[in-house]
Image (spheres, coloured by chain):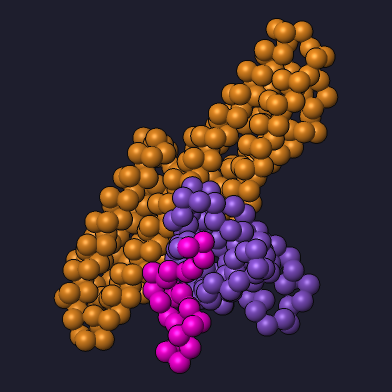
Chain colours: A purple, B orange
């Protein structure tokens, strides 16, 4: 489960000088899963996400970049970077072809010089 | 003209925001009295907390509805698309707050799932329990089944509200982006047209949300 904004407030309250502790600025990540088969366990940075109910999960997250990873037999595999912007929603669909999950961005912001680093923006 | 239509749409959303979850708050979220009497009061904490959070949610929606109303009053005086665009940004912030209250990693959603799991566990435990007479067991099972059904309804309504708020937020941000692009090429009239189309979408979304939740605005 990703760290909720409320808990962020508690953590950042202790260390106000930490960069990225501007918990007042939050946005949303919408994760959709399309496969009929059970999707692998997903991680946002180091936080394990709860099972996606009904194929869609909407998470409130602090503004910034998050690394979405899938927990496969070979270990954690990076899927994509998700950019969270203030009061905006970034949608990512996880598709599973040949048992290999991958990110499909509604709005793709993958850097031209790093095409392998798929990046979803809002 | 565009901004006045925009305001009309958001007044409706304000009403929806206030009316969103009253059905959840009045549902029977307290566990059956017999369960408490049998020493299970401590186990009821999850359900009670879910009920309390839902009441808080209603208050939050009321507060945000007031903010939307204040924003629409300000927008009443605006005519230029640049100003209306700023109004959209403010309204996106309000919708964002509504969505935050029902996000999957928010307290209310997590408590709802926890309460549902608890009700399922209680029902399984009662099936195995041999302490009570059949008629007593029947009363307890019926009570927990009612509670489980009410919790499932509340979770379903939270899911519906979440979907509606996501759709609204996405529509607002996409329209805002389009308006930005139009203003860059000085297409002001087209920008106003987009705002009008946007308010129509919001109107339809508000109506749909009202129907989904079966809730009437206070005093209706």
Residue B20 is situated, as x and y percent measured from the top left of the image, at 45, 44
Q: Quadrant of residue B129?
A: top right
Q: Is residue A72 above or below residue B62?
A: below
Residue B198 is situated, as x and y percent measured from the top left of the image, at 26, 62
Residue B117 is situated, as x and y percent measured from the top left of the image, at 66, 37
Q: Is residue B199 above or below residue B21?
A: below
Residue A70 is situated, as x and y percent measured from the top left of the image, at 59, 65
Is residue A113 found inside the magenta-colored segment of the image? Answer: yes
- Residue B37 in the figure: left or right of residue A72: right
Residue drawn at the location 58% of the way across and 34% of the way down: B151
Towards the viewer: B108 or B23: B108
Residue drawn at the location 16% of the way across and 76% of the way down: B189
Towards the viewer: B22 or B114: B114
Q: Is residue B113 above or below residue B42?
A: below
Dominant secondary structure (helix, strand or loop) of the stretch shown in magenta? loop
Residue drawn at the location 73% of the way across and 82% of the way down: A17
Question: In the picture, which quadrant includes the C terminus of chain B?
Answer: top left
Is residue A91 found inside the magenta-colored segment of the image? Answer: no
- Residue A46 in the figure: left or right of residue B206: right
Q: What range of the chain is rendered magenta?
A: A98-122
């Amino acid at each position: 489960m990703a760290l909720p904004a409320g808990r962020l407030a508690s953590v950042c309250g202790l260390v106000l000088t930490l960069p990225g502790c501007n918990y007042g600025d939050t946005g949303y990540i919408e994760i959709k899963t399309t496969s009929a088969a059970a999707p692998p366990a997903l991680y946002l940075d180091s936080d394990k996400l709860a099972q996606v109910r009904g194929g869609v999960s909407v998470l409130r997250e602090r503004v910034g970049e998050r690394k979405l990873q899938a927990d496969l037999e070979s270990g954690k595999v990076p899927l994509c970077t998700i950019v969270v912007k203030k009061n905006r929603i970034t949608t990512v669909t996880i598709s599973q072809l040949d048992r290999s999950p991958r990110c499909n961005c509604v709005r793709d912001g993958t850097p031209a010089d790093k095409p392998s680093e798929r990046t979803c923006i809002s | 003209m565009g901004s006045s239509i925009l305001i009309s749409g958001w007044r409706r959303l304000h009403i929806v925001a206030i009316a969103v979850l009253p059905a959840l708050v009045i549902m029977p979220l307290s566990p059956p009295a017999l369960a408490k009497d049998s020493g299970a009061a401590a186990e009821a904490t999850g359900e009670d907390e879910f009920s309390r959070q839902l009441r808080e949610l209603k208050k939050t929606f009321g507060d945000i509805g007031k903010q939307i109303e204040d924003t629409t009053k300000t927008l009443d005086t605006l005519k230029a698309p640049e100003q209306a665009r700023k109004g959209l940004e403010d309204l996106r912030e309000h919708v964002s707050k509504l969505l935050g209250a029902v996000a999957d990693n928010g307290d209310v959603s997590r408590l709802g799932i926890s309460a549902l799991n608890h009700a399922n566990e209680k029902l399984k435990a009662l099936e195995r329990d041999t302490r009570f007479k059949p008629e007593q067991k029947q009363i307890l099972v019926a009570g927990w089944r009612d509670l489980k059904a009410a919790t499932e309804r509340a979770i379903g309504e939270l899911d519906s509200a979440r979907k509606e708020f996501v759709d609204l937020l996405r529509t607002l941000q996409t329209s805002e982006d389009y308006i930005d692009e139009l203003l860059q090429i000085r297409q002001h009239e087209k920008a106003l047209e987009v705002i009008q189309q946007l308010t129509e979408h919001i109107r339809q979304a508000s109506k749909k949300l009202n129907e989904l939740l079966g809730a009437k605005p206070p005093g209706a």
